[in-house]
Structures are given as C-alpha cells and as structure tokens.
Amino acid sequence: MANRKTCTDSASNEAALLQVFATNTFRKVIFFASPDTGGSRNWPLMAVLVEDQSGELDVYDGDFLTATRYPRYLEVKAVLDAAQASNGNVFYATAPLPFTSGKGEDAAALDMLSVQTDVFDRSTRANYFKLLSRLSEKQYAQTYE
C-alpha cells in the first residue's frame, strides 16, 4: 500500500526528504524526473518514491521540487547531497517518468516501480541531474556565484 506525501510548498517537500535521509530508515529511494514538455516553465519536476523498512511506499509527486530556477535548484541540491551522504540504497530512473500525480497512490507507486533504474551516487549524479535541468550543477554554481 502506498501513501502520497507531497506537501503544498517546496520547502516542506525538501524538509520531508531531508528527514528521510537523516533518519536513514529507508529500504530504498528512487528519484524521478518528469517530462519537460507541456505548458509549464517549471518542468521537469522531481518525484521520489521511498520504501521504508516495512515495505510501505511513500510517493512524492506532483508539484514537488524543480531545478529550473536557482532558489529551487538549491532545494534539489540539498536533497541530492543528503541522498549521496546517506550511503543508502538510492536509485534514479534513467528516463523521464510520465506524470503520476493524477493517479491514485498505489497506481503511481506501481508506475514508479516499473521503470529502469540505476544506482544514484557521486559517479551518476550528473546523469540524473541532466533529466532535471538543461544546466549542469557546475553551470548553476558558476552562474550564481
């Protein structure tokens, strides 16, 4: 059974995921990026699936986090930094995941579990970030120093 955990503002969404990594009681975390086509300038969006130690699934999707503007990028960066530091079982979907927020929690979780993933770590972080932004993290840092 899945639970939708998305909050209404990006700071709360960031805090929720930072708490997941701080407690480090998850079995698996998977990062996703939405498609970047459509009417919103905030796309692509980040989505996350967290499986806890008991097998419960928490879905973070919808208008969750985005790296399209520098202040929002800093929230994504904090989550990615925490994931990397956790040394836990963190993965990312290697291709954009169609939007799941219009589906029920269980259907969204099934979609999230059905995609190809790769390990998220220092060596693959840039590959995941390419799905979220046209700028690399290095370019963000250089642009906004």
Image: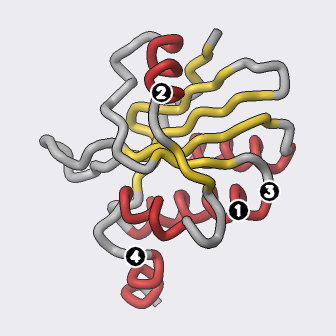
Residue at 66%, 44% in the rendered image: 17
Q: Earlier in the sequence, mark 3 or mark 2?
A: 3
* Residue at image mark 2: 114
Q: Which residue is mark 3?
A: 86
Q: Looking at the image, which residue is at 72% across and 18% down?
A: 56
- Disc 3 to disc 2, how far (Cα)? 24 Å
Tell me how far mark 4 sits from mark 1, CA to CA: 17 Å
Picture residue at 56% right of the left edge, 26% below the top: 59
Name the element at disc 1. Answer: helix
Q: Amino acid at mark 2?
A: Ser
Query: In the image, 81: left or right of 110?
Result: right
Give percent across and percent down for residue 101.
Answer: 39, 23
Q: Which mark is residue 84?
A: 1
Q: How is the image coloured?
A: secondary structure
Image disc number at residue 142: none
Secondary structure under the numbered disc 2 in the rendered image:
loop
Instruction: Name which of mark 4 and mark 1 comes first in the sequence.
Output: 1
Q: Depth check: 60 or 117 in front?
A: 117
Q: Residues within 10 Å of mark 4 (few under 14, many from 20)?
A: some
Measured Cα–Cα span from mark 1 to mark 2: 23 Å
Label 1 crowd bin: few (<14), some (14–19), many (20+), radius 10 Å: some
Query: Distance of mark 2 from mark 4, alpha carbons?
Result: 27 Å
Residue beneath label 4, please?
A: 136
Residue drawn where x is 83% and y is 19% of the image:
54
Q: Nearer the viewer, mark 3 or mark 2?
A: 2
Q: Amino acid at mark 1?
A: Gln
Instruction: For residue 10, say whether it is visible.
Output: no
